[in-house]
Image (tube, helix red, strand yellow):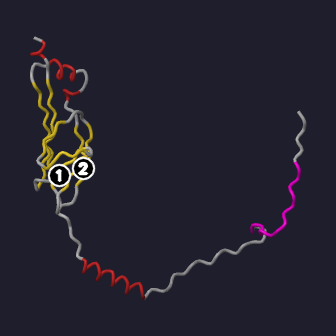
């Protein structure tokens, strides 16, 4: 009788990407290409990384919030005593952005225009150092300093 009353909760992610086939890692654990289906043990934040050639790598901090039946004391009853199986399947969909290839000729042209503008600028001016007062100046290294006065310690 007890075997029939044991409850069961199934927790799963289904990670889908557009375009499909991105390599999925969850909390630095490699999973495989998307769409990926993975079990998870706890509710909270997960670090998801998606990589695909020709697309920007996407790193997401994905919060997975617990349903109401997953809080104490209800969770004990649901996970251990409920006579049915509960499935908590989260479908997470992400859009990947294509890699933007920079136009190197445009970069060179912009750099040359900045170089030409900088050639017409006057040289930089540095502020004048403040005048040093003789009394505030540190002593010269070859200056003779007076000997320190001996300290007299009274006997105990």
Point out the image quarter for the C terminus. Answer: top right
- Specify whether residue 141 is painted magenta: yes
Give the farthest residue toward the top: 1
Total number of numbered discs in the rendering? 2
Judge from the rendering whether residue 38 lies leftward or rightward of residue 130; answer left or right.
Answer: left
Q: CA distance from mark 2 to mark 1?
A: 14 Å
Name the residue carrying label 1: 23
Q: Mark 1 packing: few (<14 Cα in 10 Å), some, or many (20+)?
A: some
Compared with 130, 61 (above or below) is: above
> Is residue 127 left or right of 76 when viewed as pictured?
right
Say which of marks 2 and 1 sits in front. Answer: 1
- Say the numbered circle drawn on residue 60: 2
Tag 2's secondary structure? strand
Q: Are marks 2 and 1 in contact (CB under 8 Å)?
A: no
Q: Position of residue 49 (x, y in %)?
A: 23, 50
Quadrant of the drawing holding the N terminus: top left
Quadrant of the rendered structure where residue 10 is? top left
Q: Going 13% across and 19% down the picture, which residue do you hit?
A: 82
Rendered position, 57 above or below 9: below
Local secondary structure at mark 1: strand
Please report the residue visible at 62 percent of the width from the left and 78 percent of the height from the top.
128
Q: Quadrant of residue 96?
A: bottom left
Q: Residue at x 27, y 41 (%)?
A: 45
* Disc nearer the start of the sequence (2/1): 1
Q: Main secondary structure of the magenta part?
A: loop
Residue at 48% across / 86% down in the picture?
A: 122
User: What residue range appears in magenta?
Assistant: 137-150
Question: Where 124 falls versus 140 (above or below)?
Answer: below
Query: In x, y percent, where is residue 121?
Result: 45, 86
Give residue 154's mark. none
Tell me if residue 147 is in the magenta stretch: yes
Outermost residue on the bottom side: it is 120
């Amino acid at each position: 009788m007890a075997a029939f009353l044991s409850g069961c909760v199934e927790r799963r992610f289904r990670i889908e990407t557009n375009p499909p086939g991105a390599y999925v890692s969850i909390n630095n654990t490699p999973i495989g290409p998307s769409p990926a289906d993975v079990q998870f043990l706890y509710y909270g934040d997960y670090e998801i990384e998606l990589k695909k050639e020709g697309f920007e790598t996407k790193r997401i901090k994905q919060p997975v919030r617990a349903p109401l039946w997953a809080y104490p004391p209800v969770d004990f009853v649901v996970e251990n005593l409920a006579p049915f199986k509960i499935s908590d399947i989260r479908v997470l969909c992400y859009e990947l952005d294509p890699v933007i290839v920079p136009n190197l000729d445009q970069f060179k042209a912009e750099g040359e225009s900045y170089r030409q503008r900088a050639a017409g600028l006057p040289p930089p001016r540095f502020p004048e150092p403040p005048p040093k007062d003789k009394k505030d100046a540190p002593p010269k290294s070859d200056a003779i300093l007076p000997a320190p006065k001996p300290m007299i310690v009274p006997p105990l």
